[in-house]
């Protein structure tokens, strides 16, 4: 995210961007592009400010807000709502989400590939993906999950859907086949369950 001098929201973004566990989605996206022959010197898929990287950071921020997850620490660091305050953590997350779509619209060419990536990211981030999975996870705190299938459904919509989106966006950018896209989706969902 472009720096805004003295902006706590920018500091919140930076804290999420440097978390080591957030590198997996970016790495999967990059490897998928390279595997399908897309090896330009600077593409959104290989950029640290990539759409999926910012989307992952947004997810990290949403789960670090006390309204979603009241932990004070995450992987040994103060959560954003503790370090910067809840309002700033929410604003930082909103900034990361919109930044992801800005990068896609501006940097991915041709337009139909950018559109496919926007659809993929919005689907992974929205009600059928991370938001819906996070809501189901919150509901599980008061209504226990009683089946393996229900637990898997939560994780398929959260981690699995986000990992699939990283792979699928790389596949779209590389213009791979529909069959390969389906394989990438299954691969991402499987890693998400294991993760």
Image (cartoon, rainbow, N blue to C red):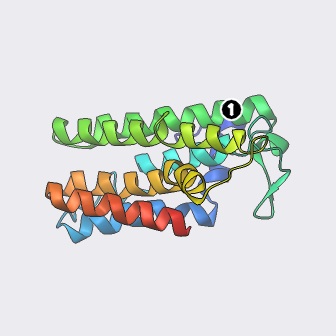
- The residue nearer to you, when weighing 59 against 111, is 59
What residue is disc 1 on?
Answer: 90
Give the residue displayed 50% in from the left and 45% down from the top: 55
Residue 24 falls left or right of residue 72? left
- Work out whether residue 43 can be spotted: no
Q: Position of residue 180 (x, y in %)?
A: 20, 62
- Residue name at image x 48 percent, y 34 percent: 126
Mark 1: secondary structure = helix
Report x, y in % for residue 171: 24, 57
Q: Relative to 39, is 81 above or below?
A: above
Q: Is residue 188 above or below residue 5?
A: below
Q: Is residue 86 left or right of residue 97?
A: right
Instruction: Write the residue at 66% across / 45% down.
Output: 137
Residue visible at 13% across and 58% down?
A: 177
Task: Return the residue nearer the eye: 172 or 130.
Answer: 130
Horizontal arrangement in the rendering, residue 166 relative to residue 40 (left or right): right
| Crowd class of label 1 (few under 14; some 14 to 19; many from 20; radius 10 Å) | many
Closest to the observer: 136 or 33? 136
- The answer to whether residue 67 is seen in the rendering is yes
In the picture, which quadrant includes the C terminus?
bottom right
When asked about the image quadrant of residue 155, the answer is bottom right
Q: Quadrant of residue 87?
A: top right
Outermost residue, front direction?
146
Q: Find residue 77 and report its horizontal and vertical position in percent.
A: 79, 59
């Amino acid at each position: 995210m472009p720096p805004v001098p003295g902006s706590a929201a920018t500091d919140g973004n930076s804290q999420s961007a440097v978390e080591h566990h957030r590198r997996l989605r970016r790495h999967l996206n990059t490897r998928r592009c390279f595997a399908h022959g897309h090896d330009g010197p600077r593409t959104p898929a290989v950029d640290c400010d990539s759409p999926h990287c910012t989307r992952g950071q947004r997810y990290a921020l949403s789960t670090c807000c006390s309204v979603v997850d009241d932990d004070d620490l995450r992987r040994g660091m103060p959560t954003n709502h503790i370090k910067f305050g809840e309002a700033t953590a929410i604003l930082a997350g909103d900034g990361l989400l919109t930044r992801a779509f800005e990068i896609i619209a501006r940097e991915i060419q041709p337009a139909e590939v950018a559109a496919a990536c926007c659809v993929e990211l919005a689907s992974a981030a929205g009600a059928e993906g991370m938001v819906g999975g996070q809501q189901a996870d919150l509901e599980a705190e008061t209504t226990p999950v009683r089946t393996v299938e229900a637990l898997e459904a939560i994780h398929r919509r959260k981690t699995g859907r986000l990992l699939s989106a990283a792979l699928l966006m790389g596949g779209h950018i590389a213009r791979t086949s529909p069959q390969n896209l389906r394989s990438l989706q299954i691969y991402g969902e499987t890693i998400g369950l294991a993760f």
